[in-house]
Amino acid sequence: MEQTTAKRFVRPLLVVLGAVVVLAIVGVVVILATAGSRREAVAFAAERACVHGPFMPGVTPESHGGSFKFPYGAVRSCRVIATESRLFNGDVDASNYLFLDTEQGAVLVRVDFRNIKAGRQYTATAVELQPEAAPPGLTTDDVTRLRADIAKRGGLRTESWTLHYGDG
């Protein structure tokens, strides 16, 4: 009687294990199949990190006020913290994390790029982040400065703004 009970459990266990192996193989295939396009997305975003719209040298509210939004005034300097493309990140192709020195102090932003395969018709939006939301790369001094400057501005600006409209 013990043998038949053991046999009853072995067969379903083997079926479950087989299904797990098949799902693992499918997962690996999906990751490998999308790796190339994610690398392309990261390269696309990296090329536009600190030379995009209002982050470009010489682009100020006075010179380009009608072309771009400057929620923190002119950007004095821009430093790339990270560029990434995640496998399951909705419609975002790639993101840059930037540390900006602006007229209103230090700002940490994430710039999300969408629809990059459409050439000049891609879109780029930016949103301010708390220091804790940054990938590794901020120094202790950066974090201290960000917190102080966010407090001076009255808190985090949660509304995103568009850097590139995708109009070609």
Image: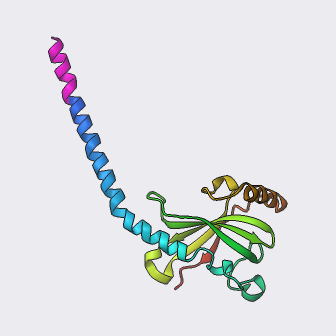
Q: Is residue 150 left or right of residue 159?
A: right
Where residue 74 appears, as percent x and y from the top left, is 76, 78
Where residue 150 appears, as percent x and y from the top left, is 78, 59
Q: Which residues are magenta?
A: 1-11
Where residue 49 appears, as percent x and y from the top left, is 59, 73
Give whichever of 67, 32 is nearer the camera: 32
**Residue occupying the point 29% across, 52% down:** 26
Q: Is residue 24 left or right of residue 91?
A: left
Where residue 119 appears, as percent x and y from the top left, is 46, 81
Residue 22, compared with residue 92, is above or below; it is above
Magenta residues, dominant SS class = helix
Give whichever of 79, 107 is nearer the camera: 79
Give whichever of 97, 20 is nearer the camera: 97
Q: Is residue 8 within the magenta segment? A: yes
Display colour scheme: rainbow
**Residue occupying the point 77% across, 72% down:** 102
**Residue occupying the point 71% across, 69% down:** 100
Residue 163, compared with residue 10, is above or below; it is below
**Residue occupying the point 73% across, 59% down:** 142
Specify the farthest residue to the right. 152
Q: Is residue 23 within the magenta segment? A: no
Residue 18 sits in which quadrant? Answer: top left
In which quadrant of the rendered image does the N terminus lie?
top left
